[in-house]
Amino acid sequence: MANRIVLNTISYHGEGAIAEIPGEIARRGFGKAFVCSDPDLVRFGVTAKVTDELDAAGVPWELYSEIKPNPTIKNVQDGVAAYEASGADMIVAIGGGSSMDTAKAIGVIVNNPEFADVTSLEGVADTKNHAVFTIAVPTTAGTAAEVTINYVITDPDRERKFVCVDTNDIPEVACVDPSMMASMPVGLTAATGMDALTHAIEGYTTKAAWEIPDMFHLEAIRLISENLRDAVAEAKSGTPGTGREGMAMAQYIAGMGFSNVGLGIAHSIAHTFSAHYDTPHGVACAIMLPLVMTYNAECTGERLRAVAKAMGVEGTDSMSIEDARAAAIAAVTRLGQDVGIPTTVDGLVAADYDQLADDALADACCPGNPRDATKADVIELLKKVTA
């Protein structure tokens, strides 16, 4: 069986990366940008860092900011209508996963209008045309939506999130500029960082893991372990530093990996928490990660030993396999504690277990889990995070 790698055509990294955006637009002959960004980023002037670059280069643009933290079908459909009315011919997505996921869905539907209901994009969609040309600018260090072939949309009527997987949705250009992440508050810095760690560890232990993504995942785990605590400290103090820069790179590298091999039930379950309780996605992933690692431990072979080593645990080579696995889980738990991740989910009650378990098992991330989960297994995991 052939393995596949899908990445951006071009990506820019480091302070000042956003200055490359006007040149990319001009070289490709586009005339007007449709800027997707969330209301808070607009309010606090983060979006303006990019639109100022467009203004200085004489690139016209129109803003769409009807984007919720867990973007809905309506957000996407309204965005499609706004794009078509704008006269734009390309998209600039500025934000975290919510803005970039919304932009991906808009871009796909504009060029594949038969999917206008949005829900038909769930799973592996059979789109024929690549999405509208998109430049993605992340403002959080976690989702890596700028380099993945995945996006997640919420169906509020059914209280569920659905994952869409499509090689036609990946942005052609990514600009990973740490200065765009400087405004992240402490909680968001911690949550998105742990989301990136979940991407890396689930991607490294998924059924589809292979050598090239493995390389990305282990480096991401190392970088996150070395930089997340510092990034959180920098967010608390309001001062720039190497932690933020390290996390900007780490989350992108994790995305290069997991986008090409899939994830597991930590993400499947996390999606249900966001849909039912509006739990921030990164928090939900961070809560579930060590529990799912424990659940999967015996199906991961020597891989948790490598995770422990990448996280800086000493003496891993001489440990028994059981001790190495325990060391990896302990290192993840300790990192989550150090950056302030809770251990239970607000609002989670036993009456919801049945629906949550069904939704998690139907999620597109579930099949990649190294251990095949049953409904009873998922409910036992839910019990562990109920207050």
Image (cartoon, helix red, strand yellow):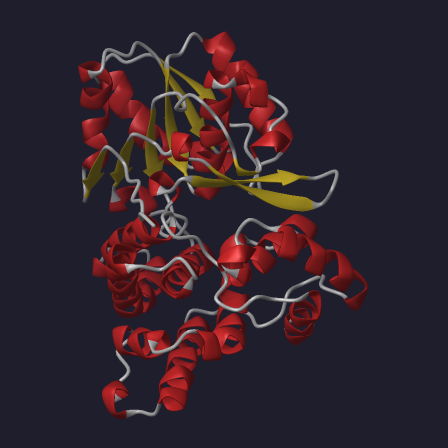
Locate the C terminus by quadrant: bottom right
Q: How many marks?
A: 0
Name the spot of residue 84 as percent of width and height, x first.
50, 11
The one nearer the camera, 6 or 237, is 6
Point 63% across, 72% down: residue: 381
Q: Is residue 130 above or below residue 236?
A: above
- The answer to whether one can see residue 99 in this image is yes
Q: Is residue 229 above or below residue 171?
A: below
The one nearer the camera, 255 or 295, is 295
Which of the 4 quarters of the picture holds residue 176?
Answer: top left
Point 31% across, 40% down: residue: 6
Which of the 4 quarters of the picture holds residue 175?
Answer: top left
- The answer to whether one can see residue 45 in this image is no
Name the spot of residue 226 as percent of width and height, x first.
26, 69
In-image side of 122 versus 370 (left or right): right
The one nearer the camera, 151 or 187, is 151
The one nearer the camera, 65 or 26, is 26
Point 60% across, 50% down: residue: 363
Name the spot of residue 142 as percent of width and height, x first.
39, 52
Name the spot of residue 138 as percent of width and height, x first.
35, 41
Point 48% across, 66% down: residue: 370
Which of the 4 quarters of the picture holds residue 348?
Answer: bottom right
The single residue placed furthest to the right in the displayed view is 351
